[in-house]
Each structure stands twice: as structure tokens, then as C-alpha cells.
Amino acid sequence: MGSGNAQVFAQSGFTVTLQDVSPPALDRARAGIEKSLGKFVEKGKLSAADRDATLARLSTAASLDALASADYVVEAIVEDVEAKRALFATLDQIVGPDVILSSNTSSISLTLMGAATRRPDKVLGMHFMNPVPLMVLVELIRGQATSTESMAVATDLTSALGKTPVEANDYPGFIANRILMPMINEAFYALMEGVGTAEAIDAVMKLGMNHPMGPLTLADFIGLDVCVAILDVLHEGLGDPKYRACPLLRRYVAAGQLGRKTGRGVYTY
């Protein structure tokens, strides 16, 4: 998600610093962005000159201090509330006082993140959909203290990226995952209970409901560990057992079968 965010901002004319604590991760991100842009060029959706200009606007850094001059921040680290709060508290000390700190979180409270800073009015959610370069929706989440001015900046920025902003309030899972994750979870229950094979479950949703991909394929694409993390946020935050992660889904995660990123999830890649 982080590399996809960086690509979209750079393609839209913004100067981008992509930061990660792992230099190898930064190398993979850069290579992935180059590959993605190459596909756009092959399909005639981007000129070679625009590809080169996009890459020229993109730099990488292993230290957070490199973000000291940033005008706007989008965070896309692991889906863990304490990790995000710690990062936001650090960023609050590094960037200028007027800089908005946004999070690409799929489900975690922006109010909690904002409370870890001295600028809760400038903390908001900017939830891009995956793959970021192709999906047009950005879910904008207003925390308890987020100002109207900050939301207006995020809305205008989203439009400048060629995306469509849709505002959601700060409830677990927001709109997208409040609806999507229970569907994915139910697909795992159907698989666990032998209602149908993985292929059959996905085929029914693709052919019968006109979804572009089945829920189990989508879960592999998202990452099964990410699905569990979001369901845990929904379960804990809303207190309803209907959000309890399916035991089969948890078993895949325990086995390290996380989906596409590990080469094996429900399916083998």
C-alpha cells in the first residue's frame, strides 16, 4: 500500500519521500513502482517521459528525519494500533506544526491516533483501496477532533490525485471494511464447514453477484493476516460475535499462509 500511495502521488506531480526502516523493503518498493509504471507505458496509458518524470519525483529514505520538510504525511505501516500511535507521536515531533498526519489504516480509530499527538485536529484517515494506482476510491475518515479545514485539504488532495473521496465517521472498520470483512469471514466459514470448495465459493460470488474476484481470492490479495487484524478491531470495537474471525482463517495465518505475499494462502501462487 505504501509504495502504491507513493506512486500515485508522484504520478500526480507531487515530490515524494517514501520512508521505511528497511532498506531492502525500499529497494523492493522502488522496483515495484518501476514495474507498475512500465505496465502503464506498455498499455499506452502513460508516456515514457511521464514515467521518467514520475520516478524523478520519488526518493526513498530509511530515517524518519527525512520527513522533516514534508507538507503532508500518509502513514501505511502494520495494522496495529500501538505501532501507529507510537509512529504518530514521533512524527508529531518531526514535521512542522501545520502538517496534516493521515493514516491509510483499514479499521483503526483515528481518534486514538490523534490523541497520541499535539495536533489531533490535523489527524485523519486516508484509506486508499488496493491496488492504489488502479482503484479510484479513497475513504476519508474524520476523527473526533479532526477539523473541517483538515478534511477539506484531504478532500482537495484526493481529487488532485484523480481519486474520488468519500467521507466516513470514526467507527471500527469505517464503511468499506465494516461491510467487506464480514463477507470474507463468512466465505471462510462456508469453506470450513464444507458448504463448497474455495473455487465454488469464489465462482458463486463472481458469476452470481458480479464481483470482479471471489472473497477468498480477495482475502489472499489483501493478506490473511490483515483480514484477521481488521476483524479483531471490529470484534473488539463493536463487541458483536458476528465479527469473530473464522477459526480456519486464523489457522491459515498461524501456518504462515498469508496469501499472495507469501506465495500461499487459500490458493497457491
Image (spheres, rainbow, N blue to C red):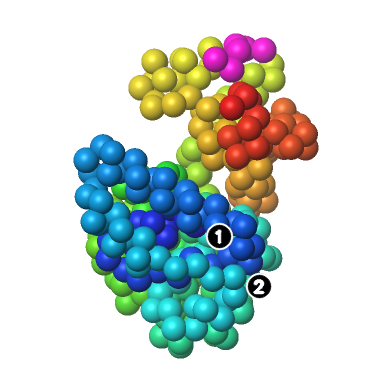
Residue in the foreground of this view, choosing between 115 and 202: 202
Q: Is residue 192 left or right of residue 117?
A: right
The residue stretch that appears in magenta: 194-199
Q: Residue at x 24, y 48 (%)?
A: 46
Looking at the rendered structure, the secondary structure element under dot 1 is helix
Q: Which residue is mark 2?
A: 86
Looking at the rendered structure, the secondary structure element under dot 2 is helix
Residue type at mark 1 is: Leu
Looking at the image, is 41 positioned above or below residue 171? Answer: above
Q: Residue at x 65, y 47 (%)?
A: 229
Residue type at mark 2 is: Ala
Q: Residue furthest bottom?
A: 97
Horizontal and vertical percent position of residue 102: 46, 68
The main secondary structure of the magenta stretch is: loop
Q: Which sits earlier in the primary sequence, circle 1 or circle 2? A: 1
Horizontal and vertical percent position of residue 98: 41, 85
Query: Does the magenta segment cover residue 196?
Result: yes
Which numbered mark, 1 or 2, is in the foreground of this view?
1
Residue in the foreground of this view, choosing between 178 and 34: 34
Residue in the foreground of this view, choosing between 212 and 196: 212
Question: Crowding at label 2, few (<14), some or many (≥20) Cα neighbours within 10 Å?
Answer: some
- Label drawn at residue 75: none
Q: Which residue is mark 1?
A: 26
